[in-house]
Amino acid sequence: MSEKLQKVLARAGLGSRRELETMIQSNRVSVDGQIAKLGDRLENVDAKIRIDGHVVSVKESTDVICRVLAYHKPEGELCTRHDPEGRRTVFDRLPKIKDSRWVSVGRLDANTAGLLLFTTDGELANRLMHPSRKVEREYMCRVFGEVNDKMVKNLVSGVKLEDGEARFEDVMYAGGEGMNHTFYVVINEGRNREVRRLWDSQGVTVSRLKRVRYGDIFLEKALPRGGWMELELKEVNYLREMVELPHEKESLLDVDKESRKRAKSKSQKIRRAVKRHDERTVEDRNTSGGRRGRNNKKPVGSSLPRNSNSDAKPTGKPTSKPSGKPTGKPSGKGKKPAAGSKPVRSKFSPNGKAPKSAPRQR
């Protein structure tokens, strides 16, 4: 059965369909010595295909095993393969694969975190992203502003945006205090910044956005930020069946009990390492009064206090070693904690009331 040339080349990991269509239109692709045209179909996978004069190899669709990764995207990462400014992208942490490449199933904004799927099957990715499939995406969003029943009804019934009408399939309130409220919302298409624009239409700003579900694939609580896990064959076939693709019969994922145990242990270590890093960063900033550059570090052995008066006159006698014994006893105020001690954190909020429990993790 013949397939479109760009589809075959994309499956071989030679680029996205859009990139390959541009190559074909630029006369950079040839098949058996003939310049390819957009819309050409490949009848024989053994044909000699060249891109920019270099021979490339392709495989039958039945020879390629479909793999799917679930990735926990942190805020700040870009959903692009290459960034000219050198910023971190979602592809930087993914495992390297041979004779194929990871294709992102949709995108998330730089300021949006949560579940992002990757697959080696470009056809699966394209079908999952197509609006006609209406695959549900669920988001946890924290909004700032007054929210009433009328606004929620507007968001569910439909709001006219600049690129057409949009709406939430479902809205569930998850709690909040003051002007900050948390909601779980469901949409069945992936338009650019759709969740944020819907809330903006009601005069409410989204301060935090996180995708927690794609179809029936949930963001696992054990998956740390920046971590990935490969989906099992059952989950892969669920995605394929949803978009009317044949089931896979093989998987490269080892799902025995021992490997599951190792994966869980590794995930816990990553989570602990991330938590320690965050705690050290906060403690360093609190101790130093803010981030300090390399050239602004306090000299070791300096006798000047951190908040000393900059207009004080020097004595004229440099002191390389402290002389004499200190007079008097320290009052205890402003004493630094001993090395290795952990800061004591209050169980209560600044207003003296116990904080409300957070909504259940999905």
Image: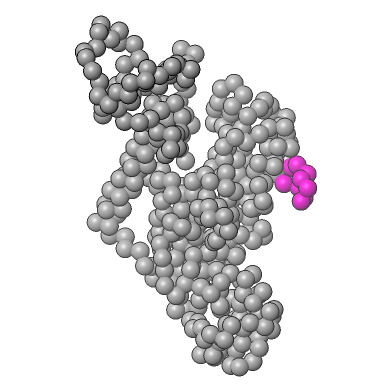
Q: Position of residue 278 (x, y in %)?
A: 39, 36
Up-down relation of residue 276 to residue 13 (above or below)? above
- Which residue: 39% across, 26% down? 287
Q: Quadrant of residue 346?
A: top left
Q: Position of residue 54 (x, y in %)?
A: 53, 85
Q: Which residues are magenta?
A: 158-166
User: Looking at this rendering, what residue extends furthest in the bottom direction?
Assistant: 33
- Which residue: 54% across, 91% down? 47
Taking depth in this image into account, of 170 and 55 the one nearest to the observer is 55
On whether residue 68 falls in the magenta region, the answer is: no
- Which residue: 46% across, 12% down? 352
Up-down relation of residue 148 to residue 165 (above or below)? above
Taking depth in this image into account, of 15 and 211 the one nearest to the observer is 15
- Which residue: 31% across, 60% down? 255
- In the image, is 277 to the left or to the right of 236? left
Q: Quadrant of residue 31?
A: bottom right
- In the image, is 40 to the left or to the right of 304? right
Taking depth in this image into account, of 99 and 249 the one nearest to the observer is 99
Q: Position of residue 15 (x, y in %)?
A: 56, 71
